[in-house]
Amino acid sequence: MAMAGARYGVCTLLASAILVFAIEWIFRGDLSGTIAFFAQPFKPGWTTIILFALILIGLDALLGRIYQGLLVVAPLTLTLAFVGHQKSLYLGDPLYPTDFLYARHWCANVR
């Protein structure tokens, strides 16, 4: 039983590392910048991986099945990374929480 728990923990940590790497790659649009982000110890990349792993484990516990939290978190965060990258390309500033309040106005400016 302990081996299964350890395997689940390692797989969740690996899945969160892949997810955070994909989010950074999509948002930055540059593979070398993403690798440099994870290579520098004073950047929050590894802390973000651990935070995502804890969120995934918590969602798995709430949903009652393993890896179901990944099905909830991954599409949402990857979509937000894509939208944030597109906004930074067109308007020059990152995606802020208040942008969701003004989404209609923002879409009109992009067109």
Image: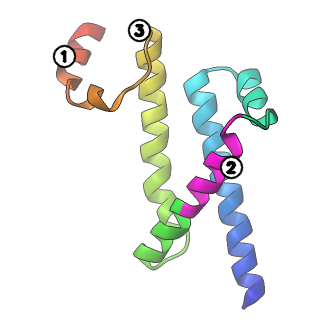
> Which element is circle 1 on?
helix
Q: Amino acid at mark 2?
A: Ala
Q: How many marks?
A: 3
Which residue is at 28% across, 26% downward?
Answer: 99
Quadrant of the snapshot with the N terminus:
bottom right
Residue reaching furthest to the bottom = 1
Which residue is at 46% across, 53% downward?
Answer: 73
The CA distance from mark 3 to mark 2 is: 29 Å
Residue 103: % across, % down: 23, 25
Q: Are marks 3 and 1 in contact (CB under 8 Å)?
A: no
Q: Which residue is mark 1?
A: 105
Query: Which segment did they paint magenta?
Result: 43-54
Q: Are marks 1 and 2 in contact (CB under 8 Å)?
A: no
Number of residues whose C-alpha sits closer than 10 Å to that of mark 3, classed few (under 14), some (14–19) or many (20 or more): few
Residue 28: % across, % down: 60, 23
Residue 76: % across, % down: 42, 45
The CA distance from mark 3 to mark 1 is: 14 Å
Q: Amino acid at mark 1?
A: His
Give the vertical position of 17 relative to 5 (above or below): above
Quadrant of the snapshot with the C terminus:
top left
Between 58 and 68, the residue placed more toward the observer is: 58
Prevailing SS of the magenta stretch: helix
> Which element is circle 2 on?
helix
Q: Are marks 3 and 2 in contact (CB under 8 Å)?
A: no
Give the vertical position of 27 relative to 8 (above or below): above
The numbered dot on residue 17 is 2
The CA distance from mark 1 to mark 2 is: 35 Å
Mark closer to the chain start, 1 or 2: 2
Q: Which residue is mark 3?
A: 90
